[in-house]
Image: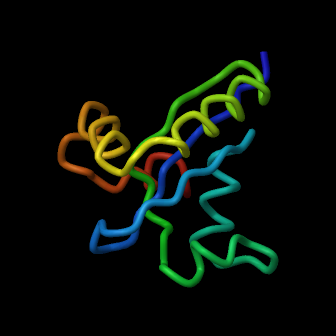
């Protein structure tokens, strides 16, 4: 099984949300945090590099399908998803990014 992730990042004020998908959460967080060349311009512009939510999937297809579904939601529904998983919106990147 190849683990893939759907993840949500925010900025330090927790006002902006970014949703992504990856097969290597640690590497992807490193790219966001270090603003690697060719990294998403949105996350660079709004300093979204704090992990507040993630889900694991066994295939990239399932992860992409879930990402698309969540992206179609209104912000309030995304916030409920985050609140159910991480009520304090604690920054979780330390658990993955070393």
Q: Which residue lies furthest to the bottom in this view?
A: 45
Write the residue at 52% across / 38% down.
Answer: 70
| Image location (x, y in percent) of residue 14 | 30, 66
Describe the colour scheme in one phrase. Answer: rainbow
User: Residue 39, relative to residue 56: is it above or below?
Assistant: below
Task: Give the quarter of the figure containing the C terminus.
Answer: bottom right
User: Residue 1, relative to residue 66: is it above or below?
Assistant: above
Write the residue at 45% across / 54% down.
Answer: 51
Q: Which residue lies furthest to the top in this view?
A: 1
- Nearest the camera: 31 or 44? 44
| Image location (x, y in percent) of residue 73 | 45, 41
- Nearest the camera: 67 or 92? 67
Task: Give the quarter of the figure containing the N terminus.
Answer: top right
| Image location (x, y in percent) of residue 66 | 61, 30
Q: Is residue 91 left or right of residue 45?
A: left
User: Residue 64, relative to residue 32: is it above or below?
Assistant: above
- Nearest the camera: 16 or 9? 16
In the rendered image, which quarter is residue 11 located in?
Answer: bottom left
| Image location (x, y in percent) of residue 18 | 51, 59
Write the residue at 62% across / 68% down.
Answer: 32
């Amino acid at each position: 099984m190849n683990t893939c992730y759907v993840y949500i990042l925010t900025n330090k004020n927790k006002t902006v949300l970014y949703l992504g998908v990856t097969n290597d959460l640690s590497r992807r967080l490193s790219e966001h945090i270090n603003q690697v060349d060719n990294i998403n311009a949105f996350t660079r512009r709004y300093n979204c590099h704090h992990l507040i939510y993630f889900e694991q999937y066994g295939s990239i297809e399932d992860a992409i399908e879930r990402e698309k579904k969540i992206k179609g939601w209104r912000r309030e529904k995304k916030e409920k998803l985050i609140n159910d998983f991480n009520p304090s919106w604690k920054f979780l990147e330390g658990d993955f990014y070393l």
